[in-house]
Amino acid sequence: MKKYLQYGILLFLFLSLISFKIRDNNRKSSKNDPEPQYLSNLEREVIEELNLARSHPKVYADFLASYADLFIGREVHESGKTILLTKEGKEAVIEAIKFLRKQAPLGILKASIGMSKGAGDMVRMQETTSQIGHKGRDGSTFAERISRYGTWSGLCSENIDYGNNVARRIVMALIIDDGVGSRGHRKSIFEPGFKRVGVSFGSHKTYNYMCVIEYAIGYTEK
């Protein structure tokens, strides 16, 4: 009998990963860009991967092409690892590759300590529970969480990945967006206006790992 590593309970997981966006047209963007010394190595690597995908999408398409070769139907067969069962299968990867081949290069995202703190709040609220999704246990939205540590402007968004502990796999999963019809995570990664990013990585009771990523057009640290 095959053993499957479900990427969460697929229906609920992928619904929970839908990326939300909120617009605010009345605030001015920030030029403040602190060095990301407060980030862990993995968190810095996630930002580097996001920036690689944004600035060199065709290069990132090659990474996904190699990943597509691991598929047999809806299953990912990777040597030495448990079989991963996806919802859409290889077709979702091929669709993401086509998107990346056509995507124009974008500017890089600069790290924000306040936005990373907001992301960290979400990790702490979920890491000891089976909860998934964007609403905090305290009822907070992601916009409210990053507002605790600064002021965002223009547009903000949140991505959450569950189950991966390697930066490239985290970003690849969000770009492929398997099971998410809107491809909301991918849209956040390739939103041209986004300039700031915050990241927090932690554990999760059900999926072992979680990574929260916050985006904004502008952000002024408190």
Image (spheres, grey):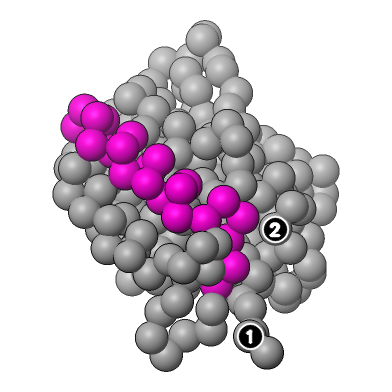
Tell whether 57 sits left or right of 2. Answer: left
Please report whichever mark, 2 or 1, sits nearer to the chain's N-terminal start: 1
Q: Which residue is mark 2?
A: 10
Q: Nearer the viewer, mark 2 or mark 1?
A: 1
Residue at 33% x, 35% y is: 99
Look at 79% across and 69% down and name the residue there: 129
Position in image of residue 185 (x %, y %): 51, 41
**Amino acid identity at mark 2:** Leu
Disc 2 vs disc 1: Cβ atoms closer than 8 Å? no
Could you tell me residue 192's position as x and y percent?
A: 33, 25
For residue 74, which numbered disc appears in the image? none
In this rendered view, identify the residue nearer to me: 99 or 145. 99
Residue 197, can we see it?
no
Q: Position of residue 197 (x, y in %)?
A: 40, 43
- Magenta region: 84-106
Residue 121 placement: quadrant? bottom right
For the residue carrying disc 1, how many other residues have a C-alpha within 10 Å: few (<14), some (14-19), or many (20+)?
few
Residue carrying label 1: 2
Q: Secondary structure at mark 1?
A: loop
Q: Residue at x 72, y 75 (%)?
A: 205
